[in-house]
Image (spheres, grey):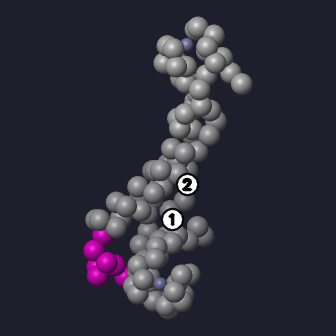
Amino acid sequence: MKFCPNCEVRLTKTDTGLRCTKCDYTEGGTTTTKQVKEEKEVSEFNVLEESDGQETLPTIKIDCEKCGHDQAVWWMLQTRSADEPTTQFYRCIKCNFTWRNYA
Ligand SMILES: [Zn+2]
Ligand SMILES: [Zn+2]
């Protein structure tokens, strides 16, 4: 267990890390970075759902991982960090399940 460096009150665990209830000193754990990254990936999906018209995307013959339908639309997306490769996304035209290809 950890104590506040300012007033030596025991730190309370919160969603964002450890927090001193007396002086509001906060200390983020190593898990904070991971949480932010996951939220970023989710929002990427949301942006695509809103901005991409499904009918304008090309289709490909591929088995849906969820319902087994054999046709999906696909598109490429360059992730924000330049050292990562372009990701290919698929979306089932039947159940709208979206997944990505890391190849
Ligand atoms: Zn404190
Ligand atoms: Zn499907």
Give the vertical position of 51 relative to 73 (above or below): above
Q: Nearer the viewer, residue 16 or 88?
A: 16
The number of numbered discs placed on residues in the rendered structure image is 2
Residue 62 visible in the picture: no
Residue 103 percent coordinates (x, y): 60, 70
Extreme-right residue of the structure: 1
Q: Are marks 2 and 1 in contact (CB under 8 Å)?
A: yes
Q: Is residue 31 left or right of residue 97?
A: right
Question: Which amino acid is tagged 1?
Answer: Thr
Residue 77 percent coordinates (x, y): 43, 63
Res. 79 mark: none
Which residue is depicted at the point 55% across and 45% down?
A: 35
Question: Which amino acid is tagged 2?
Answer: Glu
Q: Nearer the viewer, residue 98 or 85?
A: 98
Residue 31 percent coordinates (x, y): 62, 40
Which residue is depicted at the point 28% across and 74% down?
A: 53
Q: Residues within 10 Å of mark 2 (few under 14, many from 20)?
A: few
Give the structural element (helix, strand or loop) at label 2: loop
Give the structural element (helix, strand or loop) at label 1: strand
Residue behind mark 1: 87
Quarter location, residue 47: bottom left
Which residue is depicted at the point 41% across and 55% down?
A: 43
Which residue is depicted at the point 53% across and 38% down?
A: 15
Give the vertical position of 98 relative to 65 (above or below): above
Residue 10 percent coordinates (x, y): 64, 18
Extreme-top residue of the structure: 7
Residue behind mark 2: 84
Q: Which residues are magenta?
A: 52-58
